[in-house]
Image (cartoon, helix red, strand yellow):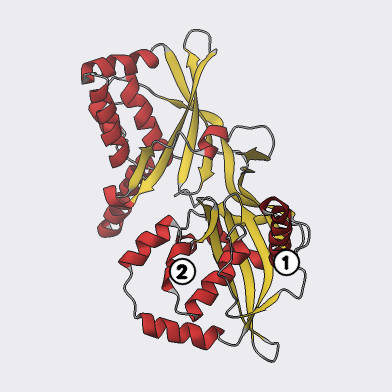
Amino acid sequence: MKFTLMPIAMILCIMSATQVLAVFEKNPPVLKKIISEEVSQFYVTDYVPYVKVELNSAQDKLQYIKQPEQTVIMYVCSQAQGNVDWFLTTLSRDYSASFLANMADQGKTKDMVSKEMKTSFADVDVWLQSIIAYGDYNIIHYVKKKVTDGSVVGIGDVAVRFQVDMGGGWKVENISDDVVFKNWNFVGDSMVITK
Amino acid sequence: MKSILFTMIMVTIAINVQAEQLRVFSYSQPVAKSILEREVKASFTDQTYIQPSEFILPVAYQNFLYAIPEETFLAELSSLINDDDATRVNLLDEKSVILEGQVSYDADEARTQINDLLVGKKVRLQRLVTLENLSVIVFDIVDTDGSTIITMAFPYTFESGKWKICNDCSIDSSNPAYIFVNDNAYDFEGSEDIISKIKVFTPVPRY
């Protein structure tokens, strides 16, 4: 008897469940996406002619930081001369602190960093080639050319932002992860990055 | 005369000092460029209910299994009207249970407000938006004359084999359900994707 009633009970259960579910009838689902889009606009301007940086310029001749180029010139000259203290003055407060923290983490002294800086700018001329205006930043692109034959041996990008809290001047910022900083030199006038 | 000459000399010196500081650079014509970053934050399904999908509150929810979000939705509203805290607390998801203990409110006052809003009214289910273990039910509270009093969206989350009330979904900005509710996702018709935000970074003057 128990055996014969079970299928009936099951059917009743299914019917009951079906009745409940039937009132929630829906149209076929439409698949949609939530998409985040961010557009960064910027302008690339070349220097005409390219600006040669006098790497031996004395520190006291280059204290004007009201132009982004001047700050970058100091940033480059201080490295070429291995003057770490001068170099640090060109960085924003946060970047300067993180630079010193990195030095400490790596167990490097100022002398060691000074040597590294001098080496990276040894026997080269530095030319400012382009400036990229982007948001609060200007990114200056430079090339290193061999003194002997003028061949390009390296490039660099330096981002500077005007700091109102540091006496009002352009300071170098570390925005190495920024999408424009990493990609500004693409061919054409627009690009799409899909994450 | 001497005075004018002296002034002119001083002005010339001042201009020269300024010229030494402010270096002049020559530029090419600027080239405008842009980068569009596109990220799919979430994929979800959007379903409309076949009408009429209306219920007079409270409904009998004693036999609900809460295997579908609609049951949890109807039980939530009905248990509020019925003053059935045991059922309602059972339907809360884990986060909401914690919040429930932290929030102090006048239960009687809240119940009066809910009763005024819901008793004798119908709810009309409009849409079900589902993203993984989250569902948002968009519904109207309908007056006795058939007019819509208000359109609302309640989020639910699938937890431990049941659909639970997700109170936290409406206040957590990292939660896609928040976007559904606060960006009025239910206003979007058809098969178009939702562009959740567009930021434009434009250059500032250089000097």
In the rendered image, which residue does mark 1 sit on?
A19
Residue at the spot 37% in from the left edge and 22% down from the top edge = A55
| Residue B62, numbered label | none
Q: Nearer the viewer, residue A101 or B90?
A: B90
Dot 1: chain letter: A
Q: Compared with residue A112, is residue A174 higher up or lower down, i.e. above or below?
A: below
Q: Secondary structure at mark 2?
A: helix
| Residue A56 visible here | no
Type of amino acid under label 1: Gln
Q: Farthest residue toward the top? A: A148
Residue at the spot 58% in from the left edge and 39% down from the top edge = A44
Q: How many marks?
A: 2
Q: Secondary structure at mark 1?
A: helix
Q: Position of residue A82 (x, y in %)?
A: 28, 19
Q: Position of residue A104 (x, y in %)?
A: 23, 24
Q: Nearer the viewer, residue A16 or B110?
A: A16
In the rendered image, which residue does mark 2 sit on?
B88
Callout in the foreground (1, 2): 1
Q: Compared with residue A81, is residue A19 higher up or lower down, i.e. above or below?
A: below
Q: Position of residue A68 (x, y in %)?
A: 42, 40
